[in-house]
Image (cartoon, rainbow, N blue to C red):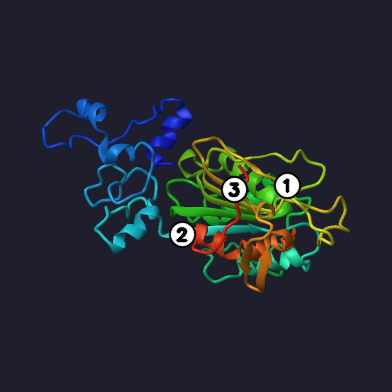
Amino acid sequence: MRGALWSAILTGSFVLGACAGGEWDAAGTDSAQTAQEAEPCAGACGAVEFNACTCAAEDPCGWAGDGYCDRDCSPFQAHQEIFDDGEDCPDCAVTMCLSGAIKPGDSGNTSIRDFCEDPRLPGVIPDCRSGRCSATFANFMHSPRKDLLPELIDALDTNGDGRVGDDDLACEVNLVGFSWGGVNAVRLAREFRNSDRVSASRTRVHRLLVMDAYQPLRSGLMKVPPNVWKARSYRHSIPREGACSASAPFGPYSGWPLLCDDWQNCRDYDYSLAPDRWFDSPIGWYRGRDVDHCAVPRVAHEPAMAELHDEPYDGPLPPLAH
């Protein structure tokens, strides 16, 4: 969603089709009349669609300087001049990765660690609480508010005053979680929004990526909070025979769906819905029917990496669950 529209949505003042743009038509009509008769880019501004018109150098939608980084316009730069959005695009990013439960050497946990050790991942926050640093945070039976939130705030508190505010360097925030850590990543995004140590202008989570998020004895509902700009879930819903988690407590595990409002940038991919389709991974190819709990971070490695960089992924993707 647009930064300008985001605030309107949260305050209830958003009207579908409203768009900032000012006077632009050759006939010289005023802004109100223009908005009624012909919206800029044929309504694509209000629909928040990135295309050759909305991304044009003239900035017909008024998106420059609105508090949202329009990296989705970047692909059009190869064919035309696009508007300068440097004011809205932070120069830094931090990524916090949360592993699955219990054993760091389990197959799924080694796969999420491989993902978070990928040098393409921006600004990974290391977990050094045990005296030895890891790219993924152990979080089994940990409180997102008490144990994880202080680590995230510390990484974003560039002026050392114990808070995240406008005096700190503006950084994009990415949260990545697998299994137990996937559920906790959603909870951490909510705690970040509600924290009195984070100013309202800095509560945005730019990307939330969860891989087969699951915790036993919970409701199975993961509501994405409104401070998340982009949410992606990669999961499987039908455990195969002999699945890696079949013998685990309360196993076998299958990922929970994300619950999002209609206006949120949210996608929930389910590999079980394409049982005969082949999916690539760093260690080889999987059919959808063979993707189990531990395999999800492998087949999601490249699609999730593309999402973290707001780039298109040209490989096979599973169907959307809803």
Q: CA distance from mark 1 to mark 3?
A: 31 Å
Q: On screen, 195 above or below 151?
A: above
Q: Position of residue 250 (x, y in %)?
A: 86, 50
Identity of the residue drawn at 16% across and 28% down: 30
SS for callout 1 = loop
Identity of the residue drawn at 69% across and 47% down: 183
Q: On screen, 149 above or below 200?
A: below
Q: Is residue 103 left or right of residue 205?
A: right
Q: Is residue 178 left or right of residue 43?
A: right
Identity of the residue drawn at 34% across and 43% down: 66
Q: CA distance from mark 2 to mark 1?
A: 34 Å
Q: Which residue is mark 2?
A: 312
Q: Which residue is mark 3?
A: 320
Q: Which residue is mark 1?
A: 143
Tag 2 and tag 1, C-beta contact below 8 Å: no
Q: Closer to the camera: disc 1 or disc 3?
A: 3
Pick whichever of labels 2 and 1 is earlier in the sequence: 1
SS for callout 2 = loop
- Disc 1 marks which amino acid? Ser
- Assign the N terminus to one quadrant of the image: top left
Q: Position of residue 283 (x, y in %)?
A: 66, 74
